[in-house]
Image: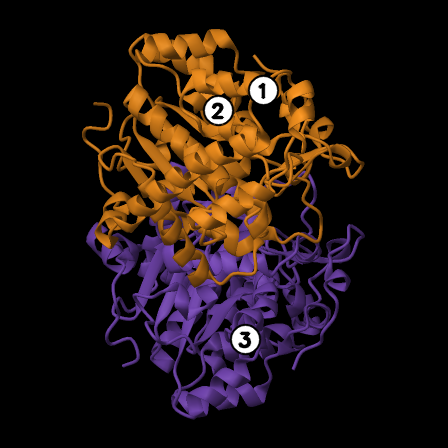
Chain colours: A purple, B orange
């Protein structure tokens, strides 16, 4: 199925090559991430048209715009998940978030928006891991602060519209233990220190908590980690929607799974949502000017988009004669991620990106500002409506009797 | 208080030096363990007469024979525990067992017999950790088998006579999670991979589960790991009775404690109970002829003691003229550990170990056989009386309201 490179060939060296791992994403020499190279290196596959067509056929609805536009662009065994689904089997979804910051930006919402679509389209249960333990270990946060951020982030996640009858949100500090801990230990027993160093690049000066953590992120890939959700369903397959920087965790998980008698989790992986200043990495929660936050006002959004890196021309004559460089145009990139209407997007692509068009940079910025403002305001309203009781309900350890309906 | 050697100086090299760590105990060149050297190397202290006298004064009873005979011979901060106790503070005891085998031998019972004495003499609560996760990770056992062995071993431990109103027995697979997991993660964050390698000798081919485990053994040293037992008692000190091969775990724990705002656990440490074939290590559960098991019959015990390494002389004339070499005499060693009566022991020491005595090897073997048979039969009766309900009662997560009475 996939390339079986030795792990050492996959280490991100400290050369000027692009670096993509769960803690660092940076392009070669400040350029753009080369996703083709990343697919080769990681050994995953490109999500091609035929798979997207299959999704449309199987779900009876138009595939999500993040599929149509290539935001989710790579996978591992997604075809097998569709095979199984077609033959009447079900699966479950697993995604997560490391709660290091109070305010989420639009890049953080992308996997959740997409996961919500998958949950609705395939009618499947979903587990969402909040890795408060990870953030405590990697960041300068107390346990209590990590736990608080996990619950604040849970509100944002719930605001994306998940179905409480099909969704279990948990934090590691709450949930590690019992069957989940057994799976952590089983995974840990199968991964040597050398292998962990090869996959994650850990050094001798890293603390042993970091060495322990990959098993925590691996455990939710196995249904037996959730006896309250999936009793007697040890063969239920798992599909993980995530950004491609999380691939190392699941490469390790997939490597270990057969030795534990478990199914390998399948993956569907997104590219990084570009920063406002340009597309050479992912947006950073620690640089407020690099991203649109769900807490930004309409005015903030307008100002940020106006300052965003453009591929258009300052003078309308140049713009008309040359067309914008869409590859470098962040407002257009944002539009192509968030604009629902395919024909409107195609129109902008032509009128702005090609010669002799009649759209200026300002027009595109205005349109994307409208769309993002609407998304952010909708999110803010939805988040304000999330009560403590709803958070409790999503995080309660409980069966989900109608999870496949 | 203690020597602050850099960890690297404490690594057991692969030379012919003695090796003492939680997984290997072997003397230099097949000789005897040099406990003075071990104390120097580990940086703990010898348990001297003045401390034993203080124990007698504070508890108002004769110190346990394991103290009088130097079976427990080393400590860390035991004097501080006694200071605190004298000024009216209480503490709690923590000990444990790695459940790798069904049948315990007498060496396994020693820390439990001693801990029972400490619990009674000081009127303090006790937590007993069954490290089923450790045994799963180090041995060729399934999770289920490790869990079963933990419960079987719990029966043997309960048979030692612990007070259920003051004792909480737990297995890691049951109990890791919540406050306990938070302390694991806090400890892990303070220990670098290099430090763990220095303390425990882990190599790149060891699996990451081994790297994670020291934090599991550290966590019970802190009262906040047991919110059901010690709510609001974060300053309660912990005393750990254990064999000295466990010292590396608690050296690490003590190093980390102040950085977490926690008290360092104190330790009281035993030497190794010698194998029947001679005193160059500890008894091994994997070699049935090296030890007296609690499942041995009277006949087994008699046969094993008869074959044990002796320091006496074959001919009674030599024995009378020379006396036995007590340093090499395993039956006498066993007698000096298990015979309650000090004056009888002194008599044997003279009549057997000195010139012109009137005791032969056979006499000593007969006496120790009687004593061990009695201990083993008492244990077997006590173990048979341990019901499933009693195991449940000791292992129930519950407060212990009369734990200091």
Callout 1 and callout 2 share a chain: yes
Q: CA distance from mark 3 to mark 1?
A: 75 Å
Task: Point out the image quarter for the N terminus of chain A.
Answer: bottom right
The answer to whether residue B264 shows anywhere in this view is no
The residue that label 1 is drawn on is B44
Q: Is residue A77 left or right of residue A151?
A: right
Mark 2 neighbour class, 10 Å CA radius: few under 14, some 14 to 19, many 20 or more: many
Dot 3: chain letter: A
Query: In this orientation, which residue lies closer to the viewer: B338 or B87?
Result: B338
Give percent across and percent down for residue A180: 41, 59
The answer to whether residue B239 shows anywhere in this view is yes
The residue that label 2 is drawn on is B267
Q: CA distance from mark 1 to mark 2?
A: 9 Å
Tag of residue A43 = none
Mark 2 element type = strand
Image marks 1 and 2: residues in contact by CB distance under 8 Å? yes
Q: CA distance from mark 2 to mark 3?
A: 73 Å
Query: In this orientation, which residue lies closer to the viewer: B45 or A405?
Result: B45
Image marks 3 and 1: residues in contact by CB distance under 8 Å? no
Dot 1: chain letter: B
- Residue drawn at x 67%, y 34% as measured from the top left: B314
Tell which tag, 3 or 1, sits nearer the viewer.
1
Dot 2: chain letter: B
- Residue drawn at x 36%, y 44% as measured from the top left: B377
Quarter of image, res B315? top right
Callout 2 and callout 3 share a chain: no
Tag of residue A348 = 3
Mark 1 element type = loop
Give percent across and percent down for residue A318: 69, 67
């Amino acid at each position: 199925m996939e390339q079986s490179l030795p792990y050492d060939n996959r280490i991100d060296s400290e050369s000027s090559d692009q670096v993509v791992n769960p803690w660092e994403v940076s392009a070669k020499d400040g350029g753009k991430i080369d996703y083709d190279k990343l697919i080769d290196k990681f050994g995953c596959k490109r999500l091609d048209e035929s798979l997207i067509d299959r999704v449309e056929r199987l779900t009876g609805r138009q595939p999500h715009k993040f599929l149509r536009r290539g935001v989710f662009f790579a996978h591992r065994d997604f075809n097998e998940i569709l095979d199984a689904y077609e033959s009447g089997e079900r699966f479950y979804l697993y995604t997560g978030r490391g709660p290091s910051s109070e305010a989420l930006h639009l890049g953080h919402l992308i996997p959740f928006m997409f996961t919500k679509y998958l949950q609705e389209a395939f009618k499947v249960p979903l587990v969402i891991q909040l890795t408060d333990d990870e953030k405590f270990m990697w960041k300068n946060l107390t346990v209590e602060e990590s736990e608080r951020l996990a619950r604040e982030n849970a509100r944002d996640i719930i605001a994306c519209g998940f179905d409480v009858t099909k969704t279990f949100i948990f934090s590691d500090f709450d949930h590690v233990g019992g069957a989940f801990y057994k799976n952590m230990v089983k995974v840990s027993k199968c991964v040597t220190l050398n292998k962990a160093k090869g996959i994650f690049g850990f050094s001798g000066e890293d603390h042993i908590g970091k060495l322990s953590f990959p098993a925590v992120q691996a455990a939710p890939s196995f249904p037996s980690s959730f006896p309250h959700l999936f009793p007697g369903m040890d063969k239920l397959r798992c599909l993980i929607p995530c950004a491609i920087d999380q691939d190392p965790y699941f490469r390790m998980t997939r490597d270990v799974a057969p030795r534990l008698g478990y199914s390998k989790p399948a993956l569907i992986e997104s590219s990084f949502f570009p920063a406002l200043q340009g597309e050479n990495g992912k947006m950073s929660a620690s640089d407020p000017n690099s991203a649109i936050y769900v807490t930004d006002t309409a005015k903030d959004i307008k100002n940020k988009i106006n300052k965003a890196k453009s591929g258009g021309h300052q003078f309308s004559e140049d713009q008309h004669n040359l067309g914008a460089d869409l590859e470098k145009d962040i407002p257009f990139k944002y539009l192509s991620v968030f604009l629902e209407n395919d024909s409107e997007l195609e129109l902008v692509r032509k009128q702005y990106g090609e010669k002799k068009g009649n759209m200026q940079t300002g027009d595109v910025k205005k349109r994307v500002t409208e769309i993002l403002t609407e998304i952010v305001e909708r999110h803010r309203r939805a988040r304000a409506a999330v009560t403590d009781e709803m958070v409790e309900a999503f995080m309660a350890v409980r069966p989900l009797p109608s999870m496949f309906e």
